Amino acid sequence: MTDLYKIALRNLLRYKRRTLLTASLITVGVVFVLIFVAVSGSFKAMMIGQITDSMMGHIQIHKKGYVASIDNLPLNLNLKSQAFARMDELLRSRKDIEASSPRLKFGGLFSNFAESTNVRLNGVYPEREFKTVPLLTSRITEGKKTIGKGEILIPALLAKGMKVKVGDPVVIVATNQDGSVNGKQFVVAGILEGVTGPGGRDGYIHIEDAAELLRMPALEISEIAIRLKDFDRLRPAFQEITKQLEAEFRKDDKFPLEIHTWEGLSPFFNIARMLDVMTFFIKLMLVALVLISVMNVMVMAVYERIREIGTMAAIGTPPGKILSLFMLEGLSLGVLGAITGGAAGFALLSVLNLSRITFDFGLQKGLLLRASVNPMDFVAIALIVILVSVVASLEPAFKASRMEPIVALRHV
């Protein structure tokens, strides 16, 4: 096999210009795919990070039916204190969960003593919330980066529209579950930059203030947001958490909870899927490019070397070895293109990262592009290129191995 491979390499070097052109086409294809995968992956990771780390978390737990009615922020679908305590203990015991944050969500009336408007609010434990969604503090453009009792973080659009500044007193009026109305005065502690998506324009207060405003005898929770230590384990972690909660809370074949990953709650998941589909079709283009390039070279090689193939067959070379010879030539072209394409692609990615390109996403400004490729993605691309190169050489190689020696030797 070693001798056969040497002959295959020698044959490729006999037609240096054609071999170089084919290898260059494969290289360009590999570079193009690597750059696209890296840049689109960077955009996707940034987009997901902005959504999950600034407001949503990776996984959320609600009482069954809450998400379908979430626009109304129903107080009658909150998790009761006893159920929340059991869930909280279970979540804290899991080593794959970095942080979790209970939230009490409700709608109310926001007043600056001169005019009023509607507002959506989250009652949270500040320390737990900031650990669960660490980018939340970066959204605070004015004021302090925390919430104390009697303080409120309000969205920038609300602050601008109502002409409210940090330090100003405001009043929140809310209707509790029984239908009675209660009000409480707060001091504006900070202004929040908005983010596109569910909950991206909500205000925040301390959860104990929220329970007091809603006159709850025992604390109730609208949702629990969870942040994982390893985001890549989102799907298995989601399945494990669901299984644990079902074992704990399912009774009479009824499960009173619903658990969602960020994918099921954010419309941006569809954009992430579009990026994946685009990447898939770009890889298909690479396959087509390699297939056409290698097949063209191998077909020409067979037609130009018919008498040579006839001579090999006439001296007793088995058809299997002739087949292997041409397939090894295709394999060599694929390996050469994959190696040079990988080297050039990673070099260009390094230049791209050193250029420190920045861009804006929604209301987030100056985000730095960090283009990188998972080593396994490169291995997959390289294997695709090599496999397609071998497949492309199969038909010409099979044709060469089936030539009749007499007919081949008579070919002019």
Image (cartoon, rainbow, N blue to C red):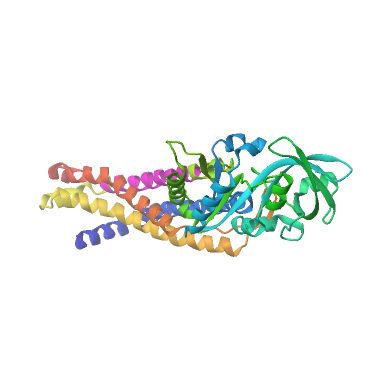
Q: Residue at x 14, y 42 (%)?
A: 404
Location of the N terminus by quadrant is bottom left
- Residue 195 location, x and y as percent? 68, 48
The stretch in magenta equals 278-302
- Residue 106 location, x and y as percent? 69, 42
In this rendering, the count of numbered labels is 0
For this view, does 161 lie left or right of residue 239?
Answer: right
Q: Residue at x 46, y 49 (%)?
A: 241
Main SS of the magenta part reads: helix
Q: Is residue 14 visible?
A: yes
Q: Residue at x 77, y 46 (%)?
A: 157
| Of 411 and 88, the residue lying toward us | 88
Does the magenta run of residues contain 197?
no
- Residue 67 location, x and y as percent? 58, 38
- Residue 104 location, x and y as percent? 65, 46
| Of 202 and 295, the residue lying toward us | 202
Does the magenta run of residues contain 287?
yes
For this view, does 345 lie left or right of residue 338?
Answer: right
Location of the C terminus by quadrant is top left
